[in-house]
Amino acid sequence: MEAIAESPARLKKRADATQKQIRGSSLLLFGRFIATGLNFASQVLIVRQLSTGQYGAWTYALAVVAFFHGISTLGLRRGITRFIPIYHEREEYDKLFGTMFMVIGTILITGTLICGGLHFAPELLARMVKDGDQPIFVVLVLIFMVPIEAVDGFLIALFASFASPKAIFLRKHILGPSLKVLVVLLLVAFDTDVLFLAYGWLGANLLGIFIYVGMLIRMMRRDGLFPHLNFRTMRMPAKEIFSFTIPLMTSDLVNIVMHSVDTLLLGYYQTSAEVAAYRVILPAAHFNKIVMTSFALLYTPLAARLFARDDFQGINDLYWRTAIWMSILSFPVFALTFGLAKPLTVLLYGERYASSWFLMQLMSFAYYFNAVLGFNGLTLKVLGKVRYVVLINVAAALVNIILALILIPRYGALGATIGTATSMVVHNILKQAGLRLASGVHIFEWKYASFYLIITVGALGLFLVQFFLGASAYIAFPLAGAISLIIFAVTRHKLDIEGTFPELLKLPLMRRIFATKKV
């Protein structure tokens, strides 16, 4: 009855907000594809330029950076995307600026402690490495990436909170990856080693930070925020924010365990070659996350604004429409990295990494499984279901650690992959089950059941073609593209392409494929 009583103006406002989120996220998705393409090209060049041992040392160092980065911000980035939009919506500028200064101060303090600690006591890290000193030297250079990446994430969260996808697009998806490509090209041109790559990587990210700060100052001046900055009235809502973010650091714990600890355990129990075999396929498997990551930047602030208005039906609509868009847009990547994992691995990395194709397949399934079920974890956090999120995060981390300790010493890279993929799937199922605790958000929308069935049939069909026929890459890749396009066209009714992207239908070919009514 409440849904019937809702005013047309409120319904229109909700629909406009959802469409704005999807369209803004799609700009970031376009940028994400560009950035991922550039980063992926860099990764392929790095794999082919460095020896297996050097590449293992490089990826081990990146895992160490990811490990410390996960704890360096104390989860405060989540506080930015949840509380800054709420404070801005309520015009509580004293808390808004207080939150910003509190977060940046925390980043600088924790970053200094982490970098200083490793440089003063590198022998503690050396005990965790089986292959000698080379990974340690790379770690001591790249560890300065911890505060740099934390500041970068803080700035991205601010731009997302103020609904500025164009700024994120330019800095994060164009400038940053381009600088890294330049570093890799210099690595190849001078035929140098992994330490040159580490110093260049660090310098490129530091330059990106300075550019991002300039963009932020310009945006805040344009939006008229500086007149509200008053240091005398500024309030740092530490209790409010830390009570939300500290428990949710268990989410960072899960990411650390699933994507860093496994690599560290591989370095302890196995050789750098095993580390390389495991890490080499992760960038390709990560392609299944790019849509989800792009949509997440704007999803959380919009869901927080709907929560501030007590519009739970709006959150449910936003959740499921976003989920189906992510499923469709991620499918072409899943088709390649899962259904065609073997020819793709050999094509990208050469025969010396041919045995890693099955690892790519397992990780791709785990990542895509997360995408098709939508932002269940983010939704639970926005709605304040912190206790449940903490419990399932701890459970998933424990499952992953137990599986890693059992499987990695015996099976190496394969054991790490099985443990990580299994833990990711279990964790996502627990998050989806938790939606039953959220008022107004459905654990599953049955009106989208046929949509998910179509995706399953397409993925299974492509897998069976490759499994039984062993088609070459020249046949398999176009087949994956054709199946993806067919699924996109068949599901166009549920995607509401006319309402979300009316500009797309101005193109004659797109109008013929995707229009659901005469235009």
Image (cartoon, grey):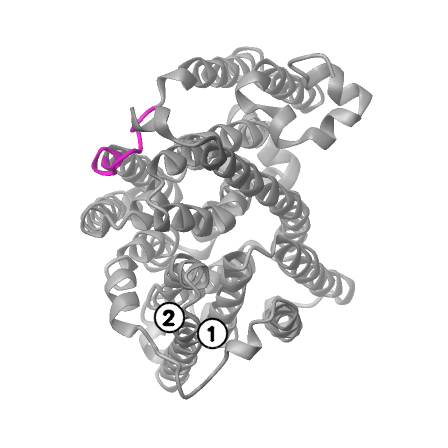
Q: Quadrant of the N terminus?
A: top left
Picture mark count: 2
* Left or right: residue 130 compared with residue 493: left
Q: Is residue 467 visible?
A: yes
Distance CA(mark 2)–CA(mark 1): 7 Å
Secondary structure category for the residue under label 1: helix
Where are the magenta residues, as a range? 434-444
Tell me the tag on residue 230. none
269 or 216, nearer to the observer: 216
The mark nearer the N terminus, 2 or 1, is 2
What residue appears at the point 65 percent right and 59 percent down from the top-left corner?
167
Q: Quadrant of residue 238?
A: bottom left
Residue 493 location, x and y as percent? 57, 16
Q: Quadrant of the C terminus?
A: top right
Q: Residues within 10 Å of mark 1 (few under 14, many from 20)?
A: many
Residue 130 location, x and y as percent? 37, 63
Q: Quadrant of residue 87?
A: bottom left
Q: Which residue is mark 1?
A: 147
* Left or right: residue 342 compared with residue 420: right
Q: Which residue is mark 2?
A: 72
Q: Residues within 10 Å of mark 2 (few under 14, many from 20)?
A: many
Residue 194 location, x and y as percent? 60, 66
Does residue 424 sit above or below 149 in this rendering?
Answer: above
In the image, what residue type sits under mark 1?
Answer: Pro
Q: Main secondary structure of the magenta part?
A: loop
Secondary structure category for the residue under label 2: helix
The answer to whether marks 2 and 1 mark residues whose Cβ atoms lie closer than 8 Å is: yes
What residue appears at the point 52 percent right and 72 percent down from the top-left corner?
148
What residue appears at the point 53 percent right and 67 percent down from the top-left corner?
155
Does residue 466 sit above or below 250 in this rendering?
Answer: above
In the image, what residue type sits under mark 2?
Answer: Ser
Q: Is residue 56 magenta?
A: no
